[in-house]
Image: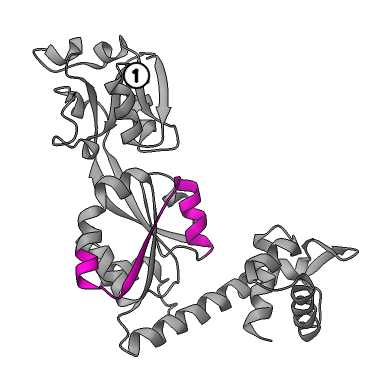
Amino acid sequence: MNVQQLKSVREAVRRNFNLTEVAKSLHTSQPGVSRQIRELEEELGFELFERAGKRLTGLTEPGTQVFPIVERALREIENLRRAGSEYAGSTTGRLIIATTHSQARYALPATVLAFRQRFPGVQLTLQQTFPEHIAELLLTGRADIGIATEALDRYPDLAAMPGYDWGHVAIVPTDHPLAAHSGPVSLAELAEHPLITYDTAFSGRRHIDEAFALHSLTPEIVLTAMDADVIKTYVELGMGVGIVASTAIDPARDQRLTALPGTDGLFARNTTKVALRKGVYLRGYAYAFLELFAPHLDQEYVQSQVFEPAAEQV
């Protein structure tokens, strides 16, 4: 058996048994994919896939049992390649960070700049997307590190570690009536105005909803968006009071907006998570990136989360 055969099997499952899509992802032909799968099945002595004519329709019972082994074998082959580059002393390579727009815009710039200065030979790629897709990119090996507030701790094959804590704050245009409020602004006062905040899948939105529900308030949410910059744009237009991550407020750029006093304590705090696929070997510069982002994510701690402890000998 060979790596290409294993990749053909893995991609067949990932691409919902569509051999045209498998061939496209592996940059080969559909007959070539079919041949690789058949040759592996012949070597194993059983069929991995159920078929309807020439089409694959699903995994057989043996195929279901074997598929995790295929994934594990490919992961370890990639780990060997990374280890080879590491011990050969290479300081070049590629690091793919999957994250949300807000993280890329507000939380990561200092880390990216410091990393670039330290590892000029490493190509750094930021893939901005929604949290569930970040998890998918990690699980399929298309990203090395995932950073988001939601979703990443829901997958047993991911090691999700705390990155940093943050809270929400309410914002209004500088000429808004609440901007002249003499003291802390309450949830009830916020609920009297139309609100603009995050989509339900992003940036701790659950804590915002829970805070209002706890006080039996039903605010009018007139607009939701996936990132703070969009929210701030519509707040500036006077469409409503915005609720955004406190880390997304930039006094130098947001001179037309005011953060309302006391609102940073109205909502439960959130924790941004850093996630890696379990069992994956990381290059030294990947560990350096993690520690630059959150100093407590040193190599020893990260490895303790990513690699399962060895079973005790009986």
Quadrant of the rendering where the N terminus is positioned: bottom right
Q: Name the residue furthest right.
A: 53
Magenta segment: 114-140
Q: Quadrant of residue 173?
A: top left
Which residue shows up at 34% across the image and 88% down it? 87
Q: Is residue 260 above or below residue 33?
A: above
Asked if residue 127 lies in the magenta stretch, the reply is: yes
Where is residue 152 drawn, in percent x and y?
43, 51
Q: Is residue 186 visible?
A: yes
Q: Position of residue 239 (x, y in %)?
A: 34, 16
Membership of 173 in magenta stretch: no
Under circle 1, the secondary element is: strand
Q: Residue at x 13, y 12 (%)?
A: 181
Q: How many marks?
A: 1
Graded by Cα atoms within 10 Å as few (under 14), some (14 to 19) or many (20 or more), the crowding at tag 1 reads many
Q: Residue furthest left?
A: 182
Q: Is residue 267 left or right of residue 82?
A: left
The x and y percentages for residue 154 are 47, 49
Q: Is residue 78 above or below residue 237?
A: below
Above or below, comparing residue 248 to residue 260 in the picture? below
For disc 1, the marked residue is 195
The type of residue carrying mark 1 is Leu
Q: Nearer the viewer, residue 278 or 220?
A: 220
Q: Is residue 313 visible?
A: no
Q: Residue at x 32, y 85 (%)?
A: 90
Q: Residue at x 74, y 74 (%)?
A: 33
179 or 66, which is in the foreground?
179
